[in-house]
């Protein structure tokens, strides 16, 4: 989303510098679609490099800073002396317990509410009501703008659904995504003898081996297909051919793959957790279920079993996805920037660490 937003702000007459961490083979700076991209530091040092760059070279050159928080924040309210906006998709919360070892998980879980409170009076951009509610519970009193999650128009040839019941998982193969629950749910799916589960995405070799081993222990290995990392085109073809997307994440900011699958005419069955409950309209564009493999399997049974309702749900899912676009996202961000002191909404220069 960040890049799509940045290039649209440039197209509307703004000047945008995007500061990020570097990676092997990356240039220190480059221009892409008018966006000036600067890279320095790695995961744990990029924040220090951002502070040094702003305080050393950028004072007075920008009208606003958009501070994108992804677990570890840049803390711009403490050092940026221009209007600033916090942009956050989701809090980490229980994800700490899945993704980090002890004691880092405990420290992160306890510390997160405290370091985020530094932003409690900052104007916030987020993509879901769930994240807004999380922030309000932490004592955020400033304005919070919910901006629509963006998705590019998806153009596909005419494709038909698989002849056998087919469900799809798309995303990282990491513990917090709980692909284990997806596989267990598939093993409980009533249509399983003739059904199949597609898994698209990559993860650590160890976790992938564990997931493959689980399919063997549950007796579903022949019907679960691991595609690994796929291109956008391949992903959309899988989405169009599947009958349902299945997600069991601990939490999400929104769940962009839900919207992408909807655009391909495919409803979703997901856990009723923050983010996913925002991207699925229960009973209209898919189903929300309690977080358990049994409940997920029942949602899959319901989606596959209610054949008269399936066409209606798929149609509504496609229609809802068509209302979400990066242009609409940009409109909302421009409106938020316009509300900052001393800003010209169309010509504003923004710096985004």
Image: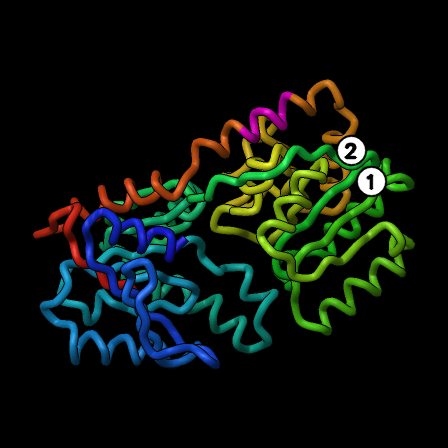
Q: Position of residue 74 (x, y in %)?
A: 31, 69
Task: Name the residue furthest top.
Answer: 308
Can you tell which quarter of the image residue 164 is in? top right
Q: In the rendered structure, does residue 317 fall within the stretch colored magenta?
A: yes
Q: Is residue 253 left or right of residue 197?
A: left
Judging depth in this view, the residue of 18 and 135 nearest the camera is 18
Q: Residue at x 68, y 49 (%)?
A: 169
Q: Main secondary structure of the magenta part?
A: helix
Q: In the rendered structure, does residue 10 fall within the stretch colored magenta?
A: no
Q: Which mark is residue 189?
A: 1
Q: Position of residue 238 (x, y in %)?
A: 68, 45
Q: Is residue 196 left or right of residue 232?
A: right
Task: Name the residue furthest front.
Answer: 157
Q: Give the structural element (helix, strand or loop) at label 1.
A: loop
Q: Position of residue 34 (x, y in %)?
A: 27, 59
Q: Position of residue 63 (x, y in %)?
A: 14, 59
Q: Are marks 2 and 1 in contact (CB under 8 Å)?
A: yes
Q: Is residue 304 left or right of residue 100?
A: right
Q: Give the tally of numbered discs.
A: 2
> Does residue 318 sit above or below 194 in this rendering?
above
* Residue ID for mark 2: 301
Q: Residue at x 72, y 36 (%)?
A: 243
Colouring scheme, one of rainbow, by chain, secondary structure, one colour: rainbow
Give, as a single range, the part of the protein colored magenta.
312-318
């Amino acid at each position: 989303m960040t890049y799509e937003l940045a290039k649209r702000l440039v197209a509307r007459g703004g000047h945008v510098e995007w500061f990020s961490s570097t990676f092997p083979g990356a240039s220190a700076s480059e221009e892409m679609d008018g966006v000036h991209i600067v890279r320095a530091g790695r995961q744990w040092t990029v924040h220090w490099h951002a502070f040094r760059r702003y305080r050393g070279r950028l004072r007075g050159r920008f009208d606003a800073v958009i501070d994108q928080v992804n677990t570890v924040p840049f803390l711009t309210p403490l050092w940026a002396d221009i209007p600033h906006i916090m942009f956050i998709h989701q809090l980490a919360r229980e994800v700490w317990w899945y993704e980090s070892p002890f004691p880092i998980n405990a420290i992160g879980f306890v510390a997160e509410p405290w370091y985020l409170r530094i932003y409690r009076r900052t104007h916030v951009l987020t993509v879901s009501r769930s994240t807004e509610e999380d922030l309000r519970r932490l004592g955020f009193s400033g304005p919070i703008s919910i901006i629509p999650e963006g998705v590019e128009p998806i153009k596909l040839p005419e494709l038909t659904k698989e002849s056998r019941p087919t469900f799809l998982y798309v995303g990282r193969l990491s513990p917090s995504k709980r692909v284990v629950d997806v596989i267990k749910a598939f093993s409980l799916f009533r249509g399983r003898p003739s059904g199949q589960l597609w898994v698209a995405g990559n993860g650590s070799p160890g976790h992938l081996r564990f997931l493959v081993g689980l399919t063997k222990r549950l007796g579903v290995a022949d019907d679960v297909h691991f595609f690994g990392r796929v291109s956008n085109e391949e992903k959309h073809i899988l989405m169009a051919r599947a009958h349902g997307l299945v997600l069991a994440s601990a939490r999400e900011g929104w769940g962009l793959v839900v919207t992408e699958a909807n655009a391909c005419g495919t409803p979703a069955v997901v856990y009723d957790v923050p983010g996913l409950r925002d991207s699925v309209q229960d009973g209209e564009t898919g189903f929300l279920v309690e977080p358990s493999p049994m409940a997920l399997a029942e949602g899959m049974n319901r989606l596959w079993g209610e054949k008269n309702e399936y066409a209606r749900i798929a149609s509504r899912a496609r229609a809802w996805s068509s209302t979400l676009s990066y242009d609409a996202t940009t409109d909302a961000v421009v409106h938020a920037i316009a509300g900052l002191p001393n800003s010209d909404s169309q010509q504003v220069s923004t710096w985004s660490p």
